[in-house]
Amino acid sequence: MSDELAALRHENAKLRRINEVLMDRVERSMDYQGNAFSLFHTAILLESKVRERTRELEAANQLAEETRSFLREAIDSISEGFILCDAEDRVALTNDNYRSMWMAGIGALEGPLLYEELLRRAALSGAVQDAQDDPEGWVAWRLVCHRSPGEPVVVRMADGRWFQISERRTRDGGIVGLHTDITELKQSEERRFEERAQSLRQAKLAADEANQSKTRFLAAASHDLLQPLNAARVFASALIDCRLPPKSRSLADSTLAALDSVDELLTTLLDISKLDAGMQPIARADFALGPLLATLAEEYALQAQAKGLRLTVMPSSLGLRSDPKLFGRILRNYLSNAIRYTPPGGRVLLGCRRQGDNLLVGVWDSGPGIPTDKLDEIFEEFRRLTPKEDAEQGRGRGMGLGLAIVRRAANMLDHRVVVRSSLGKGSLFAVQVPRAAPMAVPVPETVTPPAAVARLDGALVAIIDNDRDILDGMRSLIEGWGCQAVTGATADAVLAQLERSPDIILADFHLDEGAIGTDAVALLRRAAAAELPAVIITADYSPEIQDLCTETGCHLLTKPVRRAKLRSLVAHLLADRA
């Protein structure tokens, strides 16, 4: 029994121990299960949060995608081209309109594209009209405008479209641009411009027609205006050559001076109107300067002598290229001004200087000079600077139109006008003209008017004019120079009175019954069997008459005839005949 009891006790202790172990395990098991549940519960809560957040993110992503889609649709729906560049100036977003405007011909895009490269591809593709002459230059210009956005710029495309580009910076440093098609506006502007241009052309045409009509009227009226003026001048000139009391001579001088002013004004106004109307033909040619200088010297010799001036012409064998008539008119205006404004005892020099491939041809004088601030003003119409002492004595009266004609004629010929002046010392008025090949023509250095005057004594002068008053005045004038005069309305009337061949012929151009002076000269020359020197006198300034006189070997004088010029020319022609 004791053994059984010990065994039972041992078994009981063993069972207790097993029980303790089992209880401990159970207790431990319950603790683990409690922690696992806590973890499981936490995991379930996290999963729930994750799912909730995921649903929120999915909703946000869906909203963002919807917004992005809506924005893209909105951008694609606008009529302008849209482009967005990021902070590094890479193309981030464009719409269909932009791609059709700029990216149609630049090829497929691979990866991020810099805006500069997009511009370059568009320029090199030929799509941009403004970039065709200088693609890189155009790209550089556009980049400057693009990177410093400001006022919109306008670009013309090769297909005729016009785009206005407006660009702005974004807050993140990118650039957004709108490209507006303004082709219709531009075409409308071009149509309005063309309409305005057409209106201006029509207005100019009407103005030109009016100008030409005015010029034709002046040309037609000049003969009727200048005929009586010429007769008055001839009579006044003849009166001056007579022996008159001092008071009567003063009146005659004043009368002739007034007639000179009217003559200058009418002639100059006609010249200006012809130049402005473009009715003065330009015939450029290479010609020798020497003969022109000699002719001008002889024309103005008596005027210079009467003023007490020394007129000097420098010899020249040079040639130039210009229109001989217009160029001669420029020099004549220069000479007239120099003689008018240079005080008695002074000197006037006519000559030229080489200037590389050009010639500087002009008139130097020892006159009072011109202030520097007036050098431009004197070329304006009706602007003249008369020294106070000359104004007080009635000298130096001009219309202020001669230099206006010089400027117009020089502009027509593409010649440069040169003016230099020094107060109290004198002035240079010149024109720069292209040189031509040298032409050996001797020119006398100094003109001696007294010798020219002496050649008139005893000369027989045939005068043909259909105006009786002019014939009477010319007879008085010519005979006052010691000549004999035979006058008539026709060549036949003059021939009937001649007992010998005349030494020179003076003939009006427009005679009765459609006859012309050059035909009358030809008749007298045939009767004399000699090439008699002849002067055609006319109030008609048309170039056709000038050409006809040149063809027939006649010299041309325009009415009203200046006494000194006529006397100098007659003396010159008689000297040549001798």
Image (cartoon, rainbow, N blue to C red):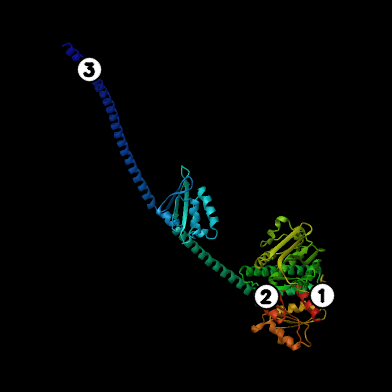
Report the number of discs. 3
Marks 3, 1: nearer the viewer: 3
Q: Position of residue 260 (x, y in %)?
A: 72, 69
Determine crowd level at label 2: few under 14, some 14-19, many 20+ residues with C-alpha closer than 10 A.
many
Amino acid type assigned to the residue bearing label 2 in the image: Ala
Image side of residue 376 versus residue 345, left or right: left
Q: State yes or no: discs 3 and 2 in contact (Cβ < 8 Å).
A: no
The x and y percentages for residue 57 are: 33, 39
Query: Residue drawn at (65%, 70%), measured in percent from left and top?
Result: 270
Identify whether 365 is placed above or below 218.
Answer: above
The residues tagged by marks 3 and 1 sit, at their Cα atoms, a distance apart of 176 Å
Residue 399 seen anywhere in this rendered image of the structure: no
| Left/right of residue 511 with respect to residue 300 in the rendered view | left
Residue farthest left in this picture: 1
Report the quarter where the N terminus lies: top left
- Label 3's element? helix
Q: Which residue is mark 1?
A: 452
Q: Earlier in the sequence, mark 3 or mark 1?
A: 3
Q: Earlier in the sequence, mark 3 or mark 2?
A: 3
Give the secondary structure at mark 1: helix
Which residue carries the number 3 mark? Answer: 14
Disc number lying in front (3 or 2): 3
Q: CA distance from mark 1 to mark 2?
A: 26 Å
Marker disc for residue 86? none
